[in-house]
Image (tube, helix red, strand yellow):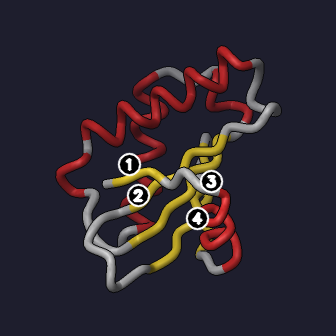
């Protein structure tokens, strides 16, 4: 697994994607058949909250990705967009929503 770090990488996913919607997050997924690793970008806009809240959401997503790294393989580029409610959600809700969305996106 690797993280999308450049605006070019984000724009590539924004232009060609499939969308998946959850209670706390939205996913944009793009297939990359020639890639072996999954690429993930995390977006938390100012609508989510102040810097502390945005960073908390991003840390939780990264912790989930570290835990679930075993089954996160395959040629996909995924951008995870946090909704406002993600900053108030507890860990179990975040984990459950991300699990459901990844199952949809990786099929």
Q: Position of residue 29 (x, y in %)?
A: 53, 69
**Quarter of the image containing the C terminus?**
bottom left
Asked if marks 2 and 1 touch (Cβ < 8 Å), the reply is yes
Cβ atoms under marks 2 and 3 closer than 8 Å: no
Cα–Cα span, label 2 and label 1 = 5 Å
Residues at circles 2 and 4 in contact by the CB criterion of under 8 Å: no
Between label 1 and label 4, give the one nearer the viewer. 4
SS under mark 2: helix
Residue 26, numbered label? 3
The mark that comes first in sequence, 2 or 4, is 4
Q: What kind of element bears circle 4?
A: helix
Sort mark 3 into few (<14), some (14-19) or many (20+) by Cα contacts within 10 Å: some
Q: Badge 4 is on which residue? A: 9
To which residue does mark 1 refer?
Answer: 99
Question: The residue tagged with tag 1: helix, strand or loop?
Answer: helix
Q: Earlier in the sequence, mark 1 or mark 4?
A: 4
How packed mark 4 is, by other alpha carbons closer than 10 Å (few <14, some 14-19, many 20 or more), is some
Helix, strand or loop under label 3: strand
Is tag 1's residue or tag 3's residue first in the polypeptide sequence? Answer: 3
């Amino acid at each position: 697994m690797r993280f999308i770090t450049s605006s070019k990488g984000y724009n590539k996913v924004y232009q060609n994607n499939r969308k998946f919607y959850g209670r706390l997050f939205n996913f944009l997924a793009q297939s990359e058949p020639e890639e072996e690793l999954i690429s993930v970008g995390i977006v938390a806009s100012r609508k989510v909250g102040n810097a502390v809240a945005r960073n908390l959401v991003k840390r939780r997503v990264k912790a989930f990705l570290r835990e679930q790294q075993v089954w996160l393989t395959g040629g996909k580029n995924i951008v995870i967009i946090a909704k406002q409610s993600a900053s108030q959600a507890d860990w179990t809700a975040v984990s459950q929503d991300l699990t459901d969305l990844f199952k949809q996106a990786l099929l």
